[in-house]
Amino acid sequence: MESLLGLLRVRIIRGVNLAVRDTSGSDPYVVLRMGRQLIFSDFFLVLNQQVYDKDTFSRDDKMGDAELEITSFIDSVKMGLADLPNGTIIRTVKPCRQNCLAGESPILWKDGKIIQEIVLRLRNVETGEIELQLMWIDIPGAPVF
């Protein structure tokens, strides 16, 4: 049985140039999925995002989707870094077929935590991006990778 080593915090910052689905504007929300559960192991990790427009009287409208391969982020956590200067870039993730990155995305040491600021270009829609942040939160007393 695997031990829980920490928590992956995903913060949705904002949507940019999202498709309009209602005449009065959209009420977007994001659904995040990663495999069947959020327990990490040594395998290829993909975080899937689906953006919807909340509707009151009908089915919510799809506003695009994106995916992000987060193995580089988890590999940075496994390095067991500590006491780096604030703002140190650990590595930079480039756009590729395994992600929907709009541009390069640095993985940083910031305020004693590993953080990745991300802009994802939405697929299956005419326009839109979502900005999000990944942060690893250690659980005190948890075993080390």
Image (spheres, rainbow, N blue to C red):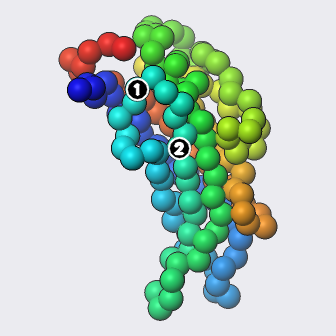
Residue 41, percent from left and from top: 40, 26
In this picture, residue 54 sits left or right of residue 139: right
- Image quadrant in which the C terminus is located: top left
**Disc number lying in front (1 or 2):** 1
Q: Is residue 38 left or right of residue 56?
A: left
Q: CA distance from mark 1 to mark 2?
A: 14 Å
Q: Position of residue 6 (x, y in %)?
A: 33, 28
Q: Which residue is mark 2?
A: 47
- Residue at the spot 70% in from the left edge and 76% down from the top edge: 20
Q: Amino acid at mark 2?
A: Leu
Quarter of the rendering containing residue 144: top left
**Count of marks placed on residues:** 2
The tag earlier along the polypeptide, 1 or 2, is 1
Establish if 124 lies above or below 20.
above
Residue 111 in view (yes/no): no
Residue sitting farthest toward the left: 141
**Horizontal side, residue 49 vs residue 104: left or right:** left
SS for callout 1: loop
Specify the amino acid type for callout 1: Ser
- Quadrant in which the N terminus is drawn: top left
Residue identified by numbered label 1: 41
